[in-house]
Image: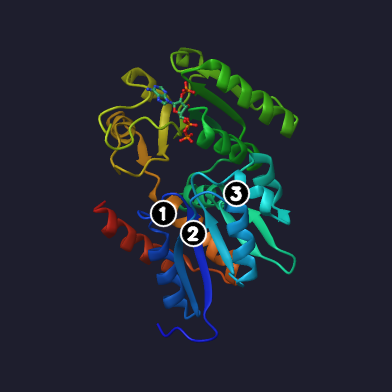
């Protein structure tokens, strides 16, 4: 593309930023749609607030925020989307007249990824594995998109209980049921969607998963692993071996970017183009299926 006086700049703030796939996604989207936009990584060593204020002064159109700044950056916002504020984490900053508005497209992107696979959440019973930062955000997603019941299973019960209490209070219903990882005989006798939101199974620990017992997988008709490195996690394998359908988290990464791009540019990215980019991402990751 030709960079000229009208070219807009977007970027990713984080530490580290070297291994990100976001420039590939956004620059390809801009090129295919024909928008004068470049997306670059911004390594911020420590002061994310000053970085964001500087970006605004430099007329930067929008930014993604990654580890470790997703919470800290909130102090630099002039406005925040309601769900992102509840979760307490933003990954997307959209330029407004006054400053930046924060959004959490990790969550709306996960919803879009799940929906694009034909998986429903509304009124469904869902098993959610984990009670860390990622699982907490997914718990909010499930609550805000109308899940029927969520069985939140974690190694440490106290963390599951804390998230359950917080989300149940925020949505004023007894939606989330905290459990330990060995409690599954107490689950209702039916197959459910299971979202894997722990860090277990992430490369290099590819031969591990959070529940090894095959018995558990009888409860799972669809498995969704937030991990995408590797694509075929042990969780994905176990779900498939027990007759379920399983997905890895790369589409979540795709759609969090697509949603951010749409917010910055006021455009709708067609599904066909999103899937074309997805093929590029898979190529980059060496994923074949
Ligand atoms: P993230 O930001 O990816 O969610 P995190 O907040 O550190 O990371 O949370 C990690 C999650 O993986 C937690 O649910 C953690 O369980 P605990 O709350 O009991 O620590 C889970 N986890 C990590 N290692 C685990 C292991 N070896 N066995 C079971 N669960 C594990």
**Chain-order first, disc 3 or disc 1:** 1
Label 3: which residue?
Answer: 90
Relative to 163, is 261 on the left or the right? left
| Residue in view at x 37 percent, y 60 percent | 278
**Chain-order first, disc 2 or disc 1:** 2
Q: Nearer the viewer, mark 2 or mark 3?
A: 2
Label 2: which residue?
Answer: 12
**In the image, ligand 1 is in what quadrant?**
top left
**Chain-order first, disc 2 or disc 3:** 2
48 and 174: which is toward the camera: 48
Q: Position of residue 232 (x, y in %)?
A: 28, 40
Relative to 47, is 223 on the left or the right? left
| Residue in view at x 63 percent, y 40 percent | 87
Label 1: which residue?
Answer: 17
| Mark 2, secondary structure of its residue | strand
Distance between the alpha carbons at the discs numbered 3 and 1: 17 Å
Picture quadrant where residue 205 is located: top left
| Mark 3, secondary structure of its residue | loop
Q: Is residue 42 visible?
A: yes
């Amino acid at each position: 593309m030709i960079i000229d006086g009208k070219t807009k700049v977007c970027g990713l703030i984080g530490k580290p930023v070297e291994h990100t796939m976001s420039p590939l996604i956004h620059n390809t989207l801009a090129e295919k749609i024909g928008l004068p936009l470049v997306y670059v990584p911004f390594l911020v060593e420590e002061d994310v607030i000053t970085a964001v204020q500087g970006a605004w002064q430099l007329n930067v159109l929008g930014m993604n925020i990654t580890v470790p700044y997703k919470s800290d950056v909130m102090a630099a916002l002039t406005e925040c989307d309601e769900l992102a504020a509840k979760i307490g984490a933003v990954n997307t900053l959209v330029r407004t007249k006054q400053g930046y508005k924060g959004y959490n497209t990790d969550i709306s992107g996960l919803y879009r990824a799940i929906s694009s696979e034909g998986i429903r959440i509304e009124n469904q019973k869902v098993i959610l594995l984990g009670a860390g930062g990622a699982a907490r955000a997914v718990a909010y997603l499930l609550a805000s998109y109308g899940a029927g019941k969520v069985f939140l299973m974690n190694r440490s019960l106290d963390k599951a209980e804390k998230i359950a209490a917080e989300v149940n209070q925020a949505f004023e219903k007894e939606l989330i049921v905290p459990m330990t990882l060995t409690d599954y005989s107490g689950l209702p006798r039916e197959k459910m969607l299971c979202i894997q939101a722990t860090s277990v199974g992430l490369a290099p620990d590819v031969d591990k998963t959070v529940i090894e017992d095959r018995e558990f997988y009888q409860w799972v008709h669809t498995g969704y692993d937030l991990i995408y490195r590797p694509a075929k996690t042990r969780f994905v394998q176990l779900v498939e071996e027990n007759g379920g359908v399983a997905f890895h988290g790369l589409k979540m990464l795709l759609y969090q970017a697509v949603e951010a791009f749409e917010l910055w540019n006021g455009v709708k990215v067609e599904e066909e183009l999103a899937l074309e980019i997805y093929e590029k991402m898979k190529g980059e990751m060496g994923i074949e299926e």
